[in-house]
Amino acid sequence: MSFEAALEKLHLARPVLRGESMARHTSFRIGGPADFLAQPSSAQEAAAVLQLAAAYAEPVTLMGRGTNLLVRDKGIRGLALKMADGLQEWSMDEETGLLRCGAGLSLAAAAHKAAELSFCGLEFACGIPGSLGGAVYMNAGAYGGEIGPLVAKVTALDEQGREHSLTGEELDFSYRHSALMEKELCVTHVELKLSQGDKEKIRAAMEELKAKRWAAQPVGEASAGSTFKRPPGAFAAALIDRAGLKGTRVGAAQVSLKHAGFIVNTGGATAQDVLDLMTCVQEKVWEKFRVRLEPEVKIIGEE
Ligand SMILES: Cc1cc2nc3c(=O)[nH]c(=O)nc-3n(C[C@H](O)[C@H](O)[C@H](O)COP(=O)(O)OP(=O)(O)OC[C@H]3O[C@@H](n4cnc5c(N)ncnc54)[C@H](O)[C@@H]3O)c2cc1C
């Protein structure tokens, strides 16, 4: 039986898509087609898909809400496993302050649910557009906060679909890094330890950070957030700005005029446009400041 036929026999709640354009699943609105795209609605479905892919030796590419991804123009060979459309469940244990979320829940939704119940800690995350799974993988952070220190436990599946449990310590978080980057595990659930706070103060902090973000960043334009990581002792955006690169274009990819740390797709940009613009920025910043900029955006797909 073919892999496609075997996938169909799983009778997933959402049908597996064939040749699906990844531009429809990334905030950059860029990316060639994935051979197969599965959007499991539960950990059980994700495990079944992983098991099958392993049996057929099909490569698997994990993704969440696609807000930190640049998918190359040739697309993704094998299976893209999108963990962000399902796995939206959540529950709060108000005794212990443990918020348990499905990996597909958005950070914004988690932050708002916590605030509603007067739990604080997630205010920094309310404007980050990713999923819980993607946030833990990336150790997402903003305005002095990071997800890593809040993580009590993560439940994840290995490539055979077997379940594992990892503590925050085991995930070895550091700046935009978690041990998941070396482990090939698919996160299905995340448990965050939050503290009790004052609902109005939490809401006010979230509003303030949201306003700051909208004032400084090209929110609403197609991008994947900060293109480059913060180099030691400097800010990527400041270096790019001082190198005079704001507004620089390759094809329809442009260094944002609002925030030099972002590359935006002004309409119809290809992944190659973005990659060429990234190289141009890296070269100019190296020439001027002798600082190497490393991508924060994850570049995936066939070369
Ligand atoms: C406008 C804008 C603003 C942003 N601001 C910020 C910011 O302030 N701070 C910040 O840190 N980031 C920011 N980002 C980037 C992005 O939102 C974060 O990195 C986010 O955590 C990515 O989550 P995602 O679900 O979109 O993951 P994706 O982009 O889909 O994937 C990112 C990586 O995580 C892996 N992954 C995703 N889900 C899982 C899973 N369930 N199990 C295992 N691995 C998984 C993928 O394989 C991939 O390597 C911004 C992006 C945009 C577009």
Image (cartoon, rainbow, N blue to C red):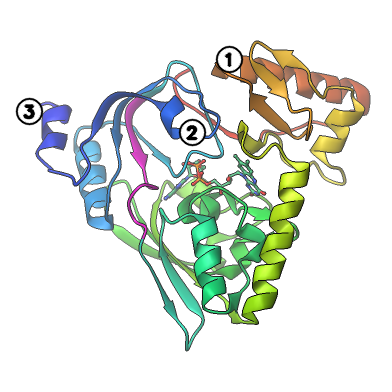
Give the quadrant of the N terminus.
Answer: top left
The stretch of residues the image draws in magenta is 77-88
CA separation in Å, label 2 and label 1? 15 Å
Kind of residue sitting beneath label 1: Gln
Q: Which residue position is annotated with label 2?
A: 26
Q: Where does the image place residue 236, in percent across and percent down from the top left?
A: 80, 37
Q: Which residue position is annotated with label 3?
A: 1
Category of crowding for the residue at label 1, using alpha-carbon neighbours closer than 10 angstroms: few (below 14), some (14–19), many (at least 20): some
Kind of residue sitting beneath label 3: Met
Q: Which residue position is annotated with label 1?
A: 272
Q: Are marks 1 and 3 in contact (CB under 8 Å)?
A: no
Residue at 69%, 28% (x, y): give it.
263
Q: Earlier in the sequence, mark 2 or mark 1?
A: 2
Does ligand 1 reach within 8 Å of label 1's beta carbon? no
Q: Earlier in the sequence, mark 1 or mark 3?
A: 3
Q: Are marks 2 and 1 in contact (CB under 8 Å)?
A: no
Disc marking residue 200: none
User: Is 58 situated above or below 159?
Assistant: above
